[in-house]
Image (cartoon, rainbow, N blue to C red):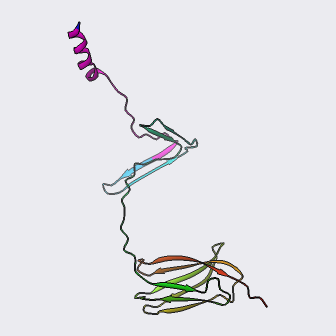
């Protein structure tokens, strides 16, 4: 009896069958293309959205889910010293660029996304003035991006009215 129990305990795990889950999409239309370096997958007609998680496996219905590998990218951002004043402002916004060595595109947007002002700050130009006297009182976003992409900054600026 002991022999049969020991054989059962040792042999049964090897004889058992387990289920496995492989990625699968059920949709009304779809395709997958692979050229060895790039893959493109698309689906159409998935109208139900739901996710089931049992702690080991996750099943998501409704949207095409690919297996993604996230790779971090180390950004080498430019070290441009930037100072904007006064904020809030009523007339002009002064921008001091301490060590600007590359052309910078400057854009001013209102809070609805409308472009209010656009210009280019030349390399080695250390001062720039944004005219704020022609815009309405409110909040604005000043976006500055270097042409090489190493500097990208957005700042909120408040335009106030002048009390008479």
Specify whether 65 is left or right of 109. left
Residue 16 is one of the magenta-drawn residues: yes
Residue that protrudes farthest toward the top in the picture: 1
Residue 152 is one of the magenta-drawn residues: no
Q: State the count of labels.
A: 0
Residue 44 position within the rendered picture, expressed as x and y whole percent measured from the top left: 53, 47
Residue shown at the point (40%, 88%) measured from the top left? 101
Does 99 sit above or below residue 2? below
- Which image quarter holds the N terminus? top left
- The segment highlighted magenta reads 2-30
- Which image quarter holds the C terminus? bottom right
Residue 149 position within the rendered picture, expressed as x and y whole percent measured from the top left: 42, 77
Pick the front one: 29 or 11: 11
Residue that protrudes farthest toward the left in the picture: 3
Pick the front one: 153 or 113: 153
Residue shown at the point (62%, 83%) measured from the top left? 87
Q: Quadrant of residue 91?
A: bottom right
Specify whether 48 is left or right of 102. right
Residue shown at the point (53%, 83%) measured from the top left? 106
Pick the front one: 2 or 55: 2
Residue 117 position within the rendered picture, expressed as x and y whole percent measured from the top left: 60, 84
Residue 128 position within the rendered picture, expressed as x and y whole percent measured from the top left: 53, 91
């Amino acid at each position: 009896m002991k022999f049969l129990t020991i054989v059962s305990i040792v042999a049964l795990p090897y004889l058992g069958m387990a289920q496995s889950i492989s990625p699968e999409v059920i949709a009304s239309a779809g395709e997958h293309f692979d050229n060895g370096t790039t893959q493109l997958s698309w689906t159409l007609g998935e109208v139900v959205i739901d996710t089931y998680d049992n702690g080991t496996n996750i099943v998501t219905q409704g949207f095409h889910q690919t297996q993604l590998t996230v790779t971090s990218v180390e950004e080498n951002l430019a070290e441009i010293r930037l100072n904007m004043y006064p904020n809030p402002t009523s007339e002009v916004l002064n921008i001091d660029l301490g060590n600007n060595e590359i052309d910078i595109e400057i854009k001013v947007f209102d809070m609805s996304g409308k472009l209010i002002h656009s210009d280019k700050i030349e390399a080695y130009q250390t001062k720039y003035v944004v005219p704020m006297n022609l815009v309405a009182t409110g909040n604005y976003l000043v976006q500055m991006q270097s042409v090489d992409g190493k500097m990208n900054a957005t700042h909120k600026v408040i335009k106030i009215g002048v009390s008479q």
